[in-house]
Image (cartoon, rainbow, N blue to C red):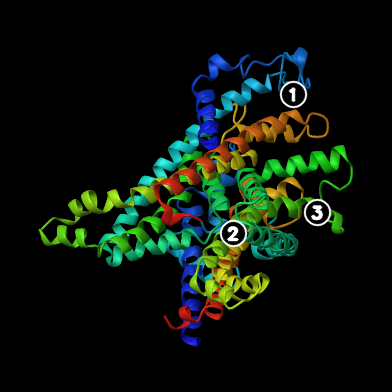
Amino acid sequence: MTRYVAGRAGQAMAAVFLALTIVFVLVRITGDPVILFLPQDVQPKDIAYFRHLLGFDRPLWQQYLSFLGGAVRGDFGQSLRYRAPALPLVLHRVPATFQLAVTSLGIVACLAVPIGIASAARRGTLVDHLGIMLTSLGQAIPGFWLGLMLIWVFGVWLRWLPVSGYGDWTHFVLPSLTLAAFYAAQVARITRSSVLDALGQDYVRTARAKGLHEPGVLGRHVLKNAAIPIVTVFGLNAGQLLGGAVVTETIFAWPGLGQYILNALLGRDFPVVMVGVFLTSVIYVGLNFLVDVSYAWLNPQVRFG
Amino acid sequence: MLGAAIVAAAVLCATFAPVLAPYNPTLAEFAATLRPPTSAHPFGTDQLGRDVLSRVIFGARISLLVGAVTVFVAGVIGCGFGLLAGYLGGWLGAAVMRLADVQLSFPFILLALTINAVLGAGFRNIMLSLAVAGWPLYVRVVRGEILALRHRDYVQAAVATGAGSGRVMRRHVLPNVATPIIVVSTLQVSQFIIAEATISFLGFGIQPPTAAWGTMVSDGRNYIFFAWWLSAFPGAALALTALGVNLLGDWLRDTLDPRLRT
C-alpha cells in the first residue's frame, strides 16, 4: 500500500513539473509577452526597456531555469498589470472558487448518484426513461447558456434570487446549479451503467438466491462494486469543475479563480495566466492522486495487482 | 434515430442557409431593433435590428464546420500518436503518453481558451486551439485498444510472415480500432461545438459580426433583462445540436460496439 501510494505520488510530482514546463512553453515560445501586453502604438525603446526589466531579453534556457527556480520558491514573477507578485494575487481568489466547487460537488453527489441508482434499479420503467432524458439534456446544454437562462427565469422574471456577485446562501444557488449541471449528468450516467453492470454479476444472483431483500442487495453488494467508476468520474470531474468555473464565474460575476484567469487573459497579463493555469493543474493532479489512493482503499486488486 | 434527425436538420440548415434564412444575417435595420418574436421575425430582432432566426440558421455553419474540422484534425493527430505509442512503444511512445497525460491534467476548456488567447482570435485559430487541446483523448483510446490487439493471433501471424510495422499497423491494427475511434469522434463533435461556443462567448474565438451561436448568446447577455430572445434561441439551437450529436453517438456506440456501452 505504501509503495503504491509512493509511486503515485512520484507520478503526480512528475506531472506537476511537466505542467510547469507546458505553461512556460505556452506563454513564452508562442509570443513575446511584452508585445502582447503593451498597446499597439508603443515605441520600440519602451518595448526594449520593458523586456529588459522583466528579463525577457535573456536566452530562453536561462529564462526557463529561473522560471523553475522561482516556481519552487513560489515566485512566479510580477503581474504586468498590478505590479505585484502574481501568486498571492491568484491565491487570494481561490477560496471563493473552492466554496462554489464544493457546493456544486455536493449537489452532484446528492442529486446525480441517487438518480443513477434509481434509473438502474428500475431499468426500462418511466423512472429510468425520465432519468436518461434528464442526463442527456444535462450533457447537451452549454453551461454559459444554462446560466443565462437561470438568470432570466429566477432573477429577471420571478425575481427570487440574486443574479450576480458573492454573498449569503442565495448567491450560491444559481452559480452552483449552473456549474453542477453538466457533471451531475455525467455522474448520473456513469452511476447508472456501473450499477447495471454490477447487477448482472453472479454474486448478485447468489445474494438474491439466498433471500437477501433488494435494498440489501443494492447496498451491500452492488454499490460497493459499482463505486470505482463512480469515484473515478467524480474525482476527474472535480478537476473539470475548475474549467467550468471560468464560464460560471464570469456569468455570475463571482470573485473566484476562473473569472480572474479570464480577466488576465483578456488583459494579456500572462504571468497571472501562468499562475492560474498552473495552480489549476496542481489541484487537478492532486485530485487524481486522491482518486488513485481511494482506488487502493476500495479495491484490494489495485493494491496488489 | 431522433439524434440522426436533429443532426440532419442542422446539416441542412448549414448547407442551405442562404436559401432558408428569411433575411440577410448581417443586415442591420435600425428602425426595428430589439423587437420581440413576431410573425415577421419569429425569433425577434437583435440590438442592430438583425433577424435572429436568420442569424441562428447561419450560425449552424460555424458550429458544424468547427465541430467537424477540429474532430478530424484532433483525431488524425491523436490516432497517429496513439498508434506510435501503442504499437511501437519504446521511449518515443512513452514520451507521447507522458505528454498526453500532462495535457489531460489541465481542464480542457481552460487549456483551449489559453491557447486561443495566445494564438489570437479568429476562425482558423479557434479550430487549431481546440485540436491542440483535444488530441490526447484519442491517444488514450487508440493506445488502449492497440495494447489489447497486438497480441492477437492475426497480428502475430502477420508479423511472423514478415510484414513490416507500417503494413501491420495499416492493414491489421487500424481497421480494428476504427470502431471505437468513430464512436469517440462522434461524441467529441458535440464537445468541440460547445467548447467553440463557450470560448466565443467569453470573448475569444469567433468574433462579431459573424453569426456564431456562442457570440450571439454573448451579445444577448447584455440585454438579458429586457430581450430574452437574443440569447435564448441561439443557445437552444446549440443545445439541440449537441443533444442530436450525442444521441447519434450513443446510438452508434450501441450498434457498432456493444463493448463500449455505458
Residue A153 visible here = yes
Q: Nearer the viewer, residue A203 or A149?
A: A203
- Which of pointers 2 and 1 indicates the residue nearer the eye? 2
| SS label for mark 1 | loop
The structure residue drawn at horizontal position 48% and vertical position 50%, both measured from the top left corner, is B133
10 Å crowding of disc 3: few (<14), some (14-19), many (20+): some
Q: Amino acid at mark 1?
A: Gln
The structure residue drawn at horizontal position 64% and vertical position 46%, both measured from the top left corner, is A133
Residue A261 visible here = no
The structure residue drawn at horizontal position 64% and vertical position 39%, both measured from the top left corner, is B201
10 Å crowding of disc 1: few (<14), some (14-19), many (20+): some
The structure residue drawn at horizontal position 55% and vertical position 37%, both measured from the top left corner, is B244
Residue topped by disc 1 = B47
On residue A192, which mark appears? Answer: 2
Q: Where is A116 relative to A221, above or below?
A: above
Query: Where residue A278 sits: x, y (%)?
Result: 57, 62
Q: Nearer the viewer, residue A38 or B50?
A: B50
Q: Earlier in the sequence, mark 3 or mark 2?
A: 3
Residue topped by disc 3 = A173
Q: Where is A36 relative to A62, above or below?
A: above
Q: Nearer the viewer, residue A33 or B7?
A: B7
Q: Are marks 3 and 2 in contact (CB under 8 Å)?
A: no
As measured in the structure, the alpha-carbon distance from the residue carrying label 2 to the one carrying label 1 is: 45 Å
Corner quadrant of residue B152: bottom left
Corner quadrant of residue B59: top right
Q: Where is A289 relative to B230, above or below?
A: below
Q: Nearer the viewer, residue B41 or B247?
A: B247
Query: Where residue B91 sits: x, y (%)?
Result: 29, 67
Which chain contains the residue that carries disc 1?
Answer: B
